[in-house]
């Protein structure tokens, strides 16, 4: 065998080894994705089993932190002018003062938010503490801490139908991964287990998607700068012309 033949053989073996390495990495990546998907499916089931218990929801939300789905969500959030600015400055976490909010005019966002929290017996600091060092961590915490404000602004109740409806807004607007999973799971579960009330569930989700299409990105709003602003004015500025309040899944029901 000549030197040229040896060189050709050596190059061929090297390329074969590289191809095998790339194939192995691709298999490992697919395996990691499969494990991640199985874990998230289990967490979605656990949320349903626990009837939306907050720690199980937080586990599902956190499972998407380091995923392509969250990166796609961040890309959409950054593309929104309000969202990009909020993310760039690492806008501080929500810290509501319910006692002070109760002193605001009754038609204000702050008063209505405080009323919802108190009437439902919620802890305003219910959300899981998270570091906000990465963009994904910051956005996850922002979405989690402002969730109940979306209920007030969009007019959805806190029953399962209202929860699915309000989650559908952020699922549609920025593709928040956990909310996409929960919204789809709510529809499928209701269709499978309670088909007689699937109509109300699907209507609530459709309403949320419709609001999401027409409104400004709720996750990108600086609510803290306008607690005293009338709720009606907030809705007008956001483009929420048909809140869910008067419907069966609305806050007024």
Image: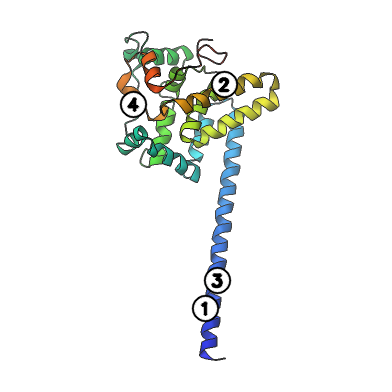
Q: Position of residue 97 (x, y in %)?
A: 33, 18
Q: Quadrant of residue 143?
A: top left
Image quadrant for the N terminus? bottom right
Residue closer to the observer: 228 or 115: 228
Q: Farthest residue to the bottom: give it.
A: 2
How far is mark 3 from mark 2, CA to CA? 55 Å
Q: Secondary structure at mark 1?
A: helix
Query: What residue is drawn where x is 68% and y is 26%?
Result: 191
Q: Earlier in the sequence, mark 1 or mark 4?
A: 1
Which one is closest to the eye, mark 1 or mark 3?
A: 1
How far is mark 1 from mark 4, CA to CA? 59 Å
Tell whether label 2 touches label 3 (CB within 8 Å): no
How far is mark 2 from mark 4, CA to CA? 26 Å
Q: Earlier in the sequence, mark 4 or mark 3?
A: 3
Left or right for 31, reference 195? left
How far is mark 4 from mark 3, CA to CA? 54 Å
How far is mark 1 from mark 3, CA to CA? 10 Å
Which one is closest to the eye, mark 4 or mark 3?
A: 4
Can the viewer see residue 133?
yes
Q: Secondary structure at mark 4?
A: loop
Mark identifier at residue 33: none
Tell whether label 1 touches label 2 (CB within 8 Å): no
- Mark 4 burial class by Cα count in 10 Å: few <14, some 14-19, many 20+: some
Image quadrant for the C terminus? top right
Mark identifier at residue 17: 3
- Mark 2 burial class by Cα count in 10 Å: few <14, some 14-19, many 20+: many
Q: Which residue, given by chain and number where applicable, does mark 2 sit on? A: 204
Mark identifier at residue 11: 1
Q: Earlier in the sequence, mark 1 or mark 3?
A: 1
Q: Which residue, given by chain and number where applicable, does mark 4 sit on? A: 222
């Amino acid at each position: 065998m000549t030197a040229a033949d040896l060189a050709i053989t050596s190059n061929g073996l090297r390329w074969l080894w590289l191809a095998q390495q790339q194939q192995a990495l691709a298999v490992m990546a697919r395996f990691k994705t499969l494990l991640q998907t199985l874990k998230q499916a289990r967490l979605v089931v656990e949320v349903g089993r626990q009837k939306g218990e907050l720690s199980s929801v937080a586990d599902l939300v956190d499972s998407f932190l380091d995923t392509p789905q969250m990166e796609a969500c961040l890309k959409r959030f950054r593309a929104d002018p309000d969202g990009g600015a909020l993310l760039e400055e690492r806008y501080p976490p929500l810290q509501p003062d319910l006692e002070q909010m109760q002193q605001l005019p009754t038609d204000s966002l702050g008063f209505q938010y405080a009323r919802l929290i108190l009437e439902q017996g919620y802890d305003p600091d219910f959300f899981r503490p998270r570091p906000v060092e990465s963009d994904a961590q910051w956005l996850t915490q922002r979405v989690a801490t402002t969730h109940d404000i979306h209920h007030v602004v969009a007019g959805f109740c806190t029953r399962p139908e209202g929860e699915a409806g309000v989650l559908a807004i952020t699922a549609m607007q920025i593709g928040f991964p956990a909310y996409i999973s929960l919204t789809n799971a709510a529809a499928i579960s209701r269709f499978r287990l309670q088909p007689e009330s699937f109509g109300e569930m699907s209507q609530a989700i459709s309403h949320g998607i419709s609001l999401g299409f027409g409104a400004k990105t709720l996750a990108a709003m600086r609510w803290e700068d306008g607690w005293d602003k009338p709720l009606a004015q907030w809705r007008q500025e956001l483009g929420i012309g048909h809140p869910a309040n008067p419907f069966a899944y609305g806050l007024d029901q």
